Image: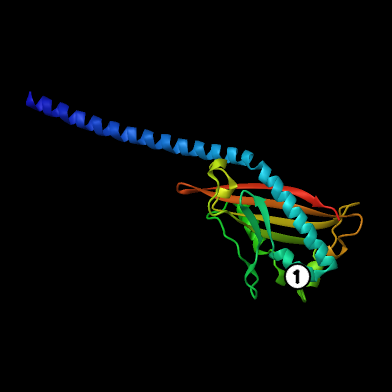
Amino acid sequence: MKATQSKEAGFSLVETLVSLVLLSLVGYFVLVSQNKAQKAMFKGTSRDAHAQIVSVVKSKTGKALEKILASALISPGGLAPLFNSELAFGEGIRLKWAKPSDPRKKTVIMDYVSNPDKVAQEALESCRQSKTYIQAWTGQELPQRLASQNLTFCGQMIMPANPDSNYGAQNIAQAKVGFVALDVSFTKVIDGSPIPLSQFGVGGTLATVTWTMLWSYEKGQENVQQFRKGIYHIVP
């Protein structure tokens, strides 16, 4: 009788342990599923919520680029204040044109997101080749810029120290880091053939700007990266 009770007690202990393991596994998979669902929902809602500021980014960068290109053609000496000025995007967000960390190496200062996805990586590589600083548009460098058919401009998004929480957790102002990459190409309107910047500004020419806006949030142990991409045109 005692042997039977001991055996039953042993089975009960094993059953309890198995149940605990199974419950733990179920809980783990439920948590993982919830995290994935929250992450997907975050991406969807934040993209919708950022439509207005994206419109501001396109408008402000377009006007700034138009001034930079015009000054490069007419009055290169006036470029310094344009590159040194910051663009205000609203909600306390500012864009600061990228600067080289070392003028001799001409590498661009940018805060990089960790483990960037393909879109972020391509934009960051483009930013490293950016000529968005005054040293690249002076002296012997200026003729090279004027002879270029494609130029890349890049800016770091400076986030406010204390973002307004009323906009919700998906607000760009609450992001860890962000930047805007602007790839500019110059063409003739009539046939789309490429031209150098030096020929831009007369009738029948066009500047096409492919913009990539990227920002990154920390969600627990993960980075949730958001990006928007599109095209706008500058007509002289």
Give the answer, above or below, for where 222 lies relative to 110: above
Give the residue furthest to the top. 1
Q: Is 40 in front, or is 88?
A: 88
Is residue 10 visible in the rendered image? The answer is yes
Give the residue furthest to the left. 2
Q: Secondary structure at mark 1?
A: helix
Q: Is 92 in front, or is 203?
A: 92
Q: How many marks?
A: 1
Where residue 215 sits: x, y (%)?
Answer: 59, 51
In which quadrant of the rendered image does the C terminus lie?
bottom right
Where residue 136 sits: x, y (%)?
Answer: 72, 70
Give the left or right position of residue 74, taking residue 127 as reference.
right
Q: Quadrant of residue 157?
A: bottom right
Q: How is the image coloured?
A: rainbow
Give the answer, above or below, for where 177 lies relative to 84: above
Q: Residue at x 82, y 58 (%)?
A: 186
Q: Residue at x 71, y 72 (%)?
A: 135
Give the left or right position of residue 181, taking residue 68 as reference.
left
Is residue 131 visible in the rendered image? The answer is no
Q: Residue at x 80, y 65 (%)?
A: 148
- Label 1 is placed on what type of residue? Trp
Give the left or right position of residue 86, taking residue 32 as reference.
right
- Dot 1 crowding, Cα within 10 Å, few <14, some 14–19, many 20+: many
In which quadrant of the rendered image does the N terminus lie?
top left
Q: Is 10 in front, or is 195?
A: 195
Q: Is 166 in front, or is 198?
A: 166
Read off the residue under disc 1.
137
Where residue 193 sits: x, y (%)?
Answer: 87, 56
Where residue 114 sits: x, y (%)?
Answer: 53, 55
